[in-house]
Amino acid sequence: MAHNSGEAAGLYESSGAGLRTDEAHSARMYDYLLGGKDNYPADQEAAEAAMTAFPTLRTAARENRAFLGRAVRHIVEETGIRQFLDIGSGLPTAHNVHQVAQRHDPESRVVYVDNDPIVLAHGRALLSTDARTTVIETDIRDPRAIVEHPETKALIDFEKPVAVLAVAILHFIADEEDPGGLVAQLRDILVPGSVIVLSHATAEISPETALGVQAAYRAQGVPLTLRDRAAFAELFAGFELIEPGIQVVSDWRPTVPESERPSHAEVSWYGGMGRLVPGLSG
């Protein structure tokens, strides 16, 4: 699926959406780190400042993206789940969730969720011919709005197991916004057999460089809160971790030999998948 930036630009120009392109946004910074073209000088400046502190940040972003793909492949091959809620999905890039899932089963359905109107505009343009995939503009801070959105309801049956993906998003949720509580709200909507996939940047492995990234993001007005493995594990409360449990993302069900994978310090990003089982929810 190739980008059609001109079509998307026409969409958001005609809609009058408040794009805030003069302010860095995490979704567009991530797009820049992945080598995408849907970003602006403010995003590029903020990402470059972060890479000054953490030179392998592009590697980390790519490893996180690859983790997402492996997680989706595992879900479609091993769990029987065919409906996905991708929260904080970011701008469309290579190997999107619907592409990975639909390669296995063309009937797989995906709702992408992001709070950046540019993501909505690009998604609308790129997914206009796919009736099983949509993108909505809302925020992980309001799980009920995500679940009750008409387009979510049109594609996702919450009476059946759902795969919720919150990859590289919870580190933009401050402690006072209660990321664990937000995950719990999503968990309480799901039926047993559902799964959640989370990933989260950390300063536990390489503190100096990772905290430099946090400072660089915050200096550009992008909130970033790094958490350690224990705090990340708490986000899976009520879920049973699926093997191999919490890992640095490059080591979660890897497809390349260890000798070809980056070091943990180059990635500094945890990932994992949990399954909702009866009687476990808190």
Image (cartoon, rainbow, N blue to C red):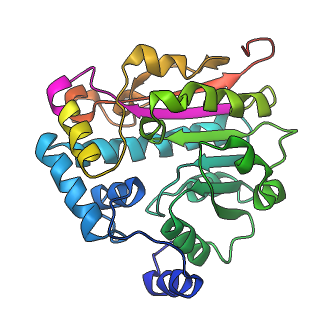
Residue extending farthest to the front is: 176
Work out whether 23 lies above or below 54. Answer: below
Residue 73 shown left or right of residue 232 in the figure: right
> Can I make out residue 261 in this image?
no
> At 50% across and 62% down in the image, what residue appears?
116
Range of magenta residues: 195-209
Q: Quadrant of the C terminus?
A: top right
Locate residue 270, reporting x and y percent: 39, 28
Work out whether 33 lies above or below 261. Answer: below
Residue 219 shown left or right of residue 169 in the figure: left
Is residue 62 within the magenta segment? no
Quadrant in the picture for residue 206: top left
Locate residue 253, reporting x and y percent: 45, 30
Judge by depth and name the residue closer to the eye, 94 or 166: 166
Residue extending farthest to the right is: 159
> Can I make out residue 154 in this image?
yes
Judge by depth and name the residue closer to the eye, 246 or 119: 119
Residue 255 shown left or right of residue 147 in the figure: left
